[in-house]
Image (cartoon, rainbow, N blue to C red):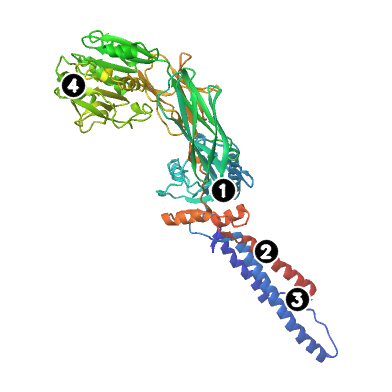
Amino acid sequence: MNFVNPGFLYGLFAVSVPIIIHLFNFRRFRKIYFTNVSFIRELKLQTQKQSKLRHLIILLLRIISVIAIVMAFAQPYIPVSENRVTPAQRNIVSIYIDNSFSMEAASESGSLLDEAREKAREIAGIYSTSDIFRLITNDFEGRHERFVSREEFINLVDEVSASPVSRSVPEIIARQNSLREETRQGSKVLYVLSPFQKSLLVKDFTQEDTAASVFFIPVEALNQDNLYIDSCWFESPVHQLEQNAELKVRIRNSSSVNLERLPIKLQLNDKQKALASFDVRPEQSAVVSMPFTESEPGIRNGIVEINDNAITFDDRFFISYNVSSLTSVLCVNGERENVFLNSLFGKDSSFLFHNVSQGNIDYSGLSGWQAIILNEMTSIPTGFIQEIVKFTENGGSLLVLPSQHVSPAVYQPLCDALQTGYFGPIDTSDMRINQINLEHPVFANVFDEIPENIDLPIVFKHFPIITQVRSRHESLLRLMNGESFISEFKVGKGRLFLFACPFEPSFSNFPKHAIFVPTLYKIAISSTVEEKLFYIIGHDDVVHVSNSNVSNDEVIHIKDMNSDFDFIPGHRRTGASIDLYPHDQVQFAGNYAVVSNSQTIKGIAFNYNRAESEMDFYTSDELTEFIKSKGLKDIHVIKDTGKPFEKSLAELTQGIRLWRWFILLALLCLLAESLLLRFRK
């Protein structure tokens, strides 16, 4: 047993007062004369024994009353745990309210967030007005970093609303330790109000050294079922006008119910483009295909939507991408233009094809092209190599056709700068191409079926492609001797394609073969920089804007398409590309636009983190076992014992308070004394 005010125990010396009174009987006796004293003597002996017994009982009751009153003022309590809040000290209380979207689930008192707010008020209610409080939420707001009074804390609790940000428990404890602590001494304690999702209570959880006691208070949802859109992606990253597209949507059923024939719809630029239905088993995922035709060029802002009444924040998924009407291809020629390239790209309305001689290259305009073909260049200037390196690293595609009139060593500086393979001495052996890399995206969906004895191009002479060990290399077509005829190398965000020979009939029949058109066509149209279909709020991703014509003086904004929300992000320029840094300024999912001079230069989509969508929570017993397994001594779980929450909390944090029982004992003793004096004369 401990005491809140042990100084009052000195009041036990007051027990001597009733003892002294009873030892020295100051009552005055009146003399009465009787004629026959023998009877009086017998009566006097009998009443004297009764009087002594009554006086001893009264003395005992008074002693107990004095002791009970003194103990009540000393406020004794029985500590429930070693890491209790010391009631005698000034308390410094931090309370974390999980305000993530998972707190929108229903509970007995409304939503989980409503229940957490109410419990936060009850926690503040068990402390005195002299204690100080601090509120912590997932938003880590600056106004919550200071300590406030109980009344101001309750006002802050009333303002807490759902947030797209989710935090793990280690992040919350680290936040508690990093905030400025109150310089005055006191008992520090942290309360964590959360449903404790298993996905956010990480396995490598460790508690940092802190003087605060931590109490986990689980809030339990009535229904933990949820259906949500997990992710979206396209089968092909290239989007062309009047071409078929297929959007894949992964849907997760986080429930124990089998769901069948549920609708899902896709809207692009406020027009419905696709409608489908899906079945998904309990605790399983389903991938839904949504085919449609790209009928409009430009930026496409999309919304994929399902219906789920339980948790709604993850029922919509936003996407944004660009549909290009033309693919721009620049061909830099050495001695003359190539007739096969002119026939393929020059007469196709889906390509913007331009020829330029190697002596008339506009270096500043290279970034505006999606693909550049170096057709038998006889010399490659150093300045041109530097610009080509920037072009490929920023996402462009480069095709190199060696010249038949110069040594392959001419291309060595370019290959070294790109850190890729290079051309070896010419090989005049005749051989056939005998292997197609069907797994490569260039040949995806090109062949329905390949016969065993397929007629592939014949190569009469070629320059072997020698690959370096560290280069990221993949072969598209291989010769019979195992050498690569077309090799792809990853360079930054772009790609380099090396061809083992020029497109000349004296070197091979590849330019006249049926495989020539789909190969060059797919390489060209896939030269579009693959941009992210969506971003996740809270991940602090970088938004890349490629081939931008925005000048240094223009201010770039990110604007919400459906509201007046607008902000200026941080940015960094790299050549013609710009990297934007939204940081934590985007708080709501939706379609956004990158704007400069009132013109939209790019569309981007932000979605909420799906980590909150999995409604898998720890129970109180599981939390207790988890804490024991990690050896966390300063963390305790407040379980639902059937008692009022405020009483259970007070017992766990401040021990079992006994002063009320001593007050009751004192009153009973005084009542017994009064009755004894009144009715036992």
* Distance Cα–Cα, label 2 vs label 4: 110 Å
Q: Local crowd at mark 2 within 10 Å, few (<14), some, or many (≥20)? A: some
Q: Secondary structure at mark 4?
A: loop
Q: Earlier in the sequence, mark 1 or mark 3?
A: 3
Report the Cα–Cα distance between label 3 and label 2.
Answer: 35 Å
Amino acid type at circle 4 is Phe
The residue at which mark 1 appears reads as 219
Spatial separation of the CA atoms under disc 2 and disc 1: 36 Å
The spot of residue 320 in percent (x, y) is 47, 25
Return the residue nearer the eye: 199 or 456: 456
Q: Which mark is residue 664?
A: 2
The residue tagged 4 is 460
Residue 678 in picture, x, y percent from top left: 79, 71
Q: CA distance from mark 4 to mark 3?
A: 143 Å
- Seen from this angle, which residue lies furthest right? 35
> Label 2's element?
helix
In the rendered structure, which disc, 4 or 1, sits on the residue that comes first in sequence? 1
Identify which residue, 309 or 520, lies in the foreground: 520
The residue at the far front in this view is 453
Structural distance between the alpha carbons of marks 4 and 1: 75 Å
